[in-house]
Amino acid sequence: MKIFMIASEVAPLIKVGGLADVVGALSKELAGMGHEVRLVCPLYSGIKKIGKWIPYNIPLTVNLGRENLQCRIWESRLPGSEVETYFLEFNEFYDRPDVYGNSSRGPQDNDRRFIFLSRAALNLCYYLGWIPDVIHCHDWPTALVPVYLNANDFYEPLGKAASILTIHNLQHQGHFPYSSIEYAQLPASVYRPDCLEAMGHVNFLKGGIYNATKITTVSPEYAREILKPDNGHGLHHILKLRAGDLIGEINGIDTSVWNPQSDPLLPATYSISNRKGKGLCKAELQKELGLEIKAEIPLFGVVSRLYQQKGLDLLAEAVAAIMETTDGQIALLGTGEKELEERFKQLGERFKGRVGVQIGFSDQLAHLIYGGSDFFVMPSRFEPCGLSQMYAMRYGTPPVARSTGGLIDTIDPYGKGKRDATGLLFADATPEDLGSAIERAAILYRDQPKEYRRLQLNGMRKDFSWKNPSATYENIYRWAVETRKQAG
């Protein structure tokens, strides 16, 4: 099949969150299966230019608003693959280090920036003389692509292409004024409650859900959760309408990057059969963050964005009690809400030697936390899929996580007599429930070393590669192509 990926970010070139990891790893896996995969992404100033880049001499024309805009095209390869990757150079929108705004105007022009991405990506197919069988879009920044295919391009060659929209996080939807439709040159008929209109605004994601041939999200449990009012963020009605075309499929991880046996970012590597290196990683992590270097003390790692969704405020509330009820240490790396950043800095000062905090992001420190911690903490209020728990298990670091979304689908919870457990789950998004789970983990580590080792080994043996998810996506693509043929 000819598969066209359209995304606002792609690892390892430009990354904000897990979406970038999914786009990069899934594209490589599908290409390895023999499919012709091409990918398009904006050329941000913060992008990593890896490998050979070839500029196209003839610009791509994109008609938006009342203007004929000219865009320069660059071609490269996704690192470690044969995936042809195209970059849209349009400095007015993308000459910024960050993906989702942060210019002198702030993110107020995000509607135009991602309308441009959607329309330019489709125009690129005509420009190249290449018509894909399937166009795979990701989250609200590319959710207008299925709208374009049905409203503007249905009777054009691209109208035969099936569209897949993957919802990585339903909370982010792309709300904009009506002028967005005019700028996109979409017909006024798309501004209706069963398409783009939502409470007097334009909702990009809603339009994508209504128009996509098939909709996927990133875990089976999350697919069930978003059909309910509490988790549907106002879109549960249209998702229930499209429920027959909604598929939840757990993400994979790039096991060539996330591998404790060969990870160049670790001070020592290790494996299931020889875990000596993990102890060396723990000592190095303790040293790095100013913690007491003691192997017998359980070390709880956190690598996260510091936002309410991730439940890090719950951890901040629970730290003092955790320090009283356990002898554990906490190693935290993250950035996000300024108030939470300050709270964790203060906790690091208050509990010096037991709580180590680094605000910001370091790829090397992130890998060290996955490799050097004894447990990995994820108190998410909701979690569509989550990749961190899979990284942690692969590195022999059992997760302590809230029972929600993809965490339910990927973690086998510890309990009496359970020999296949890989981590600990807790039910309520409260500091008390989180603290109780961490206390249980500390007791397990100290008093039941055989049970703890079983958790470690069970997690390390789990297959979190893209092998099974990519096969599922291959079937979804075939299903979508047949559905689109019938619609035509």
Image (spheres, rainbow, N blue to C red):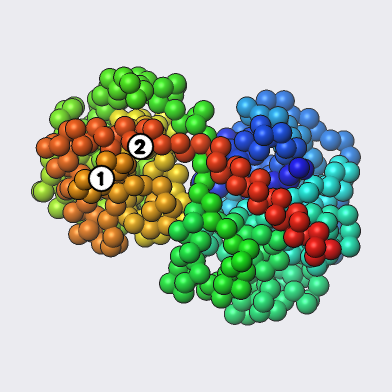
Mark 2 sits on what residue? 459
Q: Residue at x 18, y 54 (%)?
A: 436
Placement of 144 over or under 229, stated as above or below: above
In the rendered structure, the answer to whether residue 46 lies left or right of residue 392 reads right
- Horizontal and vertical percent for residue 217? 55, 56
Q: Position of residue 268 (x, y in %)?
A: 35, 19
Q: Which residue was labeled with disc 1? A: 418
**On screen, residue 473 above or below 366:** below
Amino acid type indicated by mark 2: Gly
- State the image quarter where residue 182 is shown: bottom right
Q: Residue at x 39, y 43 (%)?
A: 389
Front residue of 89 and 13: 13
Q: Report the label total.
A: 2
- Residue at image position (72%, 37%) is 35
Q: Residue at x 79, y 47 (%)?
A: 132
In this rendering, does residue 409 appear at all? yes
